Amino acid sequence: MTVAVVRFGGSNCDRDAVRALAHLGVDAAVAWHDDGLPADTDGVVVPGGFSYGDYLRAGAMAAQSPVVAEVRALAADGVPVLGVCNGAQIGCEAGLAPGAFTTNASARFQCERVHLRVENATTPWTAAYSEGDVLEIPIAHGEGRFEIDDDAYADLVADDRVLFRYCNADGEVTEAANPNGSTGAVAGVTGDRDHVAVMMPHPERATLPALGATDGQGILGAFA
Amino acid sequence: MSLGDSDRERVVAALGRDPTPAEAALFENLWSEHCAYRSSRSLLSAFDSDSEAVVVGPGDDAAVVRVPGTDQLVTVGVESHNHPSYVDPYDGAATGVGGIVRDTLSMGAYPIALADALYFGDFDDEHARYLLDGVVEGISDYGNAIGVPTVAGATQFHDGYTGNPLVNVACVGLVTEDRLVTAAAKSPGNKLVLVGNATGRDGLGGASFASEDLAEDAETADRPAVQVGDPYTEKLLIEANETLLDRDLVVAARDLGAAGLGGASSEMVAQGELGARITLDAVHQREPEMNAMEILLAESQERMCYEVAPADVDAVREVATRYDLGCSVIGEVTTGNYVCEFDGETVVDAPATVLADGAPATDQPSTVPQAPATDRPDPALGTAIDAVLSAPNTASNEWVYRQYDHEVGARTVQRPGEDAAGLALHEADDGTTVALSAGANPGWTACQPYAGAYATAVENATNLAAAGAEPLAAVDCLNGGNPEDPDVYGGFEAMVAGLADGCRAIDTPVVGGNVSLYNDSATGPIAPTPTLAVVGYRDQHPVPGSGLAGDGDLVLVGGHADGLGGSVYLQALGGTDQFPAADAAGVDAVREAATRADTLAVHDISDGGLAVTLAEMVTADAGATVTVPGLAALFSECPGRAVVETRDADALQAALDVPVVRLGSATTDGTLSVTVDDETVTRDAATIRDHRGVIARELD
């Protein structure tokens, strides 16, 4: 599989994603947004960063770019697409996933290790885990609070589209373990179909053994 | 401020005529204290700056050292952004980050880590907290957006900084020999190309603003001298710089910092012993009707000046366009003078070497600082422990570093909160880690500038040692007050001597740095502040960390110390004392201890002394029970020592040739229990966390 890691101006986790995927044996390369996606693209990562400086609203500018139209078309064809952090914000802005990620309850940027509980282990992103597994994966965002209206949230839960919820080390979803005030402590969701997903925590920062945390390998392993 | 009389005479003699207004402004900025180190130059020869590892020493934008056993080079540089951060803490600090990152780019390197040493007035002062909040947010917003992790640093509070905080920023970059670039212009006929932001009227006279005391109305009057940062453009510039290097299009490079285009371009050609002919009208501008002096000296951010072969100019323009960056060919390298033309007229025509190196050094009178008397307080043990553990200067910095993306880049193996940061050198593919420590303690240098600065070197080396790393090179940011005051200059002079001797003692070359004087305001001068950033390496990843395991013996490598001068203990409880003499021999011993298989945890002694070291090692699941011979032993901050939890204290004691004192043992109850003279005080992990949470509590 050849995974395109889309780089916008202001993306900054693109190299990290390529390195993590390479560690898992996945052929991946950075694709500059303006060049479009390579013809042999059969997987897409929209990485973290600050596309267009996030000067309008996080992800809003990138969501309107031609390359995202290409990503949308590939997703419709069944190509796996993962948006991480700013990539998740872009995914929601582009309608690839429901809801929106907005300013943390703390109103500050937060870089820390958090725990995630696997809510649905039947997607490509979570097939390596069991439902209820607790993963330790870092977050680093100022706008990671998942917001969605009540009806849409009810649908999301009913359709089993919540991938991860923030939890404590014992797997309990508590207010104290929710780092940003996300609705339902949601950390990641799938789009209309299972092969499209967005998440705020960074699996590429929990993949390389040298960094001492490898719980994210199963997520990026979906591209293997 | 304008060009002084004696400088004007010197300029007239060099040019053989009166300077034009643009020349006078250029000389004023380039010959300022900030750019020309006039009061400090004579002191800087005290530093040893060479070693086998050094590839590029002092004088370029950043220094370059080889990582032993690999084909990788690291760059390291440090910069102050002190006055701007007082006037506008958010933008002042943000542009400090931007500037040091561009210093890294101009060596051909990719930035991989930032460290910030921040100094504010008393934490109880509301304005100090406002400045802290703004500075941290500025660093966070800029550093996070450009994708360079902020992995190390320090936050200090001391009353000398009330009217003049310090923001010292260091950056480490990664480069290989074939991509290394320097600032020196190489060949006449090559083009000078400006890439990046358009030039506006921002930051006018920033270099001279940094070279005088802050006035009481500085927050309003000097705001135009503060630049405004645009991290999005900086990130594009980082990527464009990489692409230019990938395509081998850069002959020489310098970022535009102090004194703007005039500073960067004249220094490039001066270093190459060449000249330039520059057409100021060609500079891409974002404000109408700028005059020659404004174009020449504006400190608009996110701009780089490249020397480019004529045949490559179109390719450079193409790269700039790809990244939505402005690009203008502003002139060319010549064999003559440094010449600038504007609107068809010659506005500058001076030898580049006179501009860059012609400023005379100033000999300042100095008074030798006196050692303080000994007058120690006599508090109860529990009172002393609570006072020191809850002091802002020993508080947890988590509130600060949580706002920094310290993991972007996927290299961070040792995170903020540990003694030193560790960054995986993936490129070496052999487990090598680059280590970084940065900071200084103004309490130490305020007490005794020489001994305090010496100890700063030992302390940073001990931080690396506790991470199992060896130092490679250091850069310093020497901050002082108004050098025209003999007491201030005497303290500065002693600080420089102490730092130079300390760096010699830890066997570490000082390969670059920055001097910031006139850190003086209506509330008085700052303490001499020798921020040191030390980069080191370790050839394997695993490091023990500072958290107790709970099942070993606790020993103090380096033995007990007695001097309390400069300590948080005296700051909190009153009194005076001499600063303890730091022993650099402890550094190697701590590294040896940190890398032994039977070592479970290591944490060095610094701010707050042994008491704080132990408190920081306690976790909810692991505690420490220790006996200490007296309050001085518990609170002396003498560096070059570390607490080690070990499974084999006898073997450790036998292996080291410095004193190794048995303190007690680690426990599994998450409690710190300290016995001094038959009196025992116990604090649990929750109480310790509460004591140490003062910054988060007051600022959230």
Image: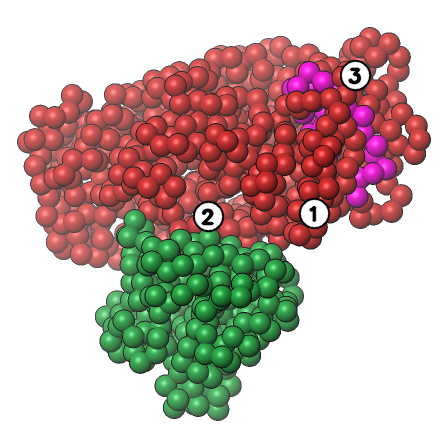
Q: Which residue is mark 2?
A: B149
Chain identifier of the red chain: B
Q: Identify which amino acid the numbered label 3 is placed on.
A: Gly
Q: Residue at x 49, y 66 (%)?
A: A40
Quarter-of-image position of residue B27: top right
Question: Magenta segment, which residues?
Answer: B257-284
Of labels 2 and 3, earlier in sequence is 2
Distance of label 1 from label 2 (alpha carbons) = 29 Å
Query: Is residue B483 shown left or right of residue A85?
Result: right
Image coords of residue B452 (percent x, y): 40, 24
Q: Which mark is residue B318?
A: 1
**Color encoding of the figure:** by chain
Q: Residue at x 35, y 19 (%)?
A: B507
Of labels 1 and 3, earlier in sequence is 1
Distance of label 2 from label 3 (alpha carbons) = 43 Å
Q: Is residue B262 magenta?
A: yes
Disc 3, SS: loop
Against A55, is B364 above or below?
A: above
- Chain letter for the residue marked with disc 3 in the picture: B
Nearest the viewer among B315 and B670 is B315
Quarter-of-image position of residue B583: top left
Image coords of residue B336 (percent x, y): 79, 16
Q: Which residue is mark 3?
A: B336
Q: Are marks 1 and 2 on the same chain?
A: yes
- Chain letter for the residue marked with disc 1 in the picture: B
Q: Identify which amino acid the numbered label 2 is placed on.
A: Pro
Q: Are marks 1 and 3 in contact (CB under 8 Å)?
A: no
The answer to whether residue A174 is seen in the rendering is no
Query: Is residue B698 shown left or right of residue B622?
Result: right
Q: Is residue B431 magenta?
A: no
Quarter-of-image position of residue B103: top right
